[in-house]
Amino acid sequence: MPNRSRIVAAPPAAVEEVLVRVGGNLRVARLRRNLRIEDLARRMGVSRATVSAVERGAPGVSAAAWLGALWALGLIGPARELADPDRDSEGKALESARLPRRARPRHPLDDDF
């Protein structure tokens, strides 16, 4: 049996909370569309067990399965914004802190043309 990564075996509480919440949201979306697990599985090209695992928020399910469920339910649009560099205020601040404070010319400017 292959070793499971620590993030899968014991995800941080915040990760587990999001997985369970998104999985539940996907289940509600499926039910609102009057789809059976089999129907969604067929649309995604996966097994019933995979859809069930996504809906339970199982941490070992591949990102492709999560995104496939969003796609099959017509909810993929907002996922395009995940980890958008333009919305990463912490990353921007760190990048800005590494930039030089001011630009200094290597050679003094000469106005003599």
Image: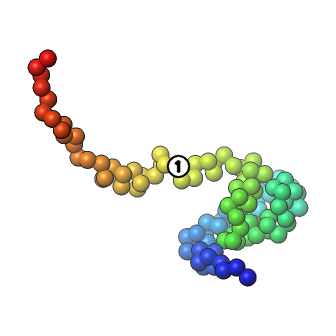
Whether residue 72 is visible to the viewer of this picture, yes or no, is yes
Instruction: Identify the residue at image location x=22%, y=42%.
Output: 102
Please state, as top left, top right, bottom left or bottom right, where the N terminus lies in the image.
Answer: bottom right
- How busy is the neighbourhood of tag 1: few (under 14 within 10 Å), some, or many (20 plus)? few
Query: Does 88 appear above or below 4?
Result: above
Asked where in the image residue 67 lies, by quadrant, the reply is bottom right
In the current view of this chain or complex, which residue is farthest to the top?
113
Label 1: which secondary element:
loop
Using the image as rendered, state which of residue 56 and residue 31 is in the foreground: 56
Instruction: Identify the residue at image location x=82%, y=69%.
Output: 49
Instruction: Identify the residue at image location x=79%, y=67%.
Output: 50
Q: Is residue 91 left or right of residue 51?
A: left
**What percent of the width, then of the height, locates residue 20?**
67, 69
Using the image as rendered, state which of residue 98 and residue 74 is in the foreground: 98
* Kind of residue indicated by mark 1: Asp
**What percent of the width, then of the height, locates residue 55?**
75, 66
Asked where in the image residue 9 lies, by quadrant, the reply is bottom right
**What percent of the width, then of the height, locates residue 52?**
79, 68
Using the image as rendered, state which of residue 47 and residue 54 is in the foreground: 47
Using the image as rendered, state which of residue 51 and residue 25 is in the foreground: 51
Please state, as top left, top right, bottom left or bottom right, where the C terminus lies in the image.
Answer: top left
Q: Circle 1 sits on which residue? A: 84
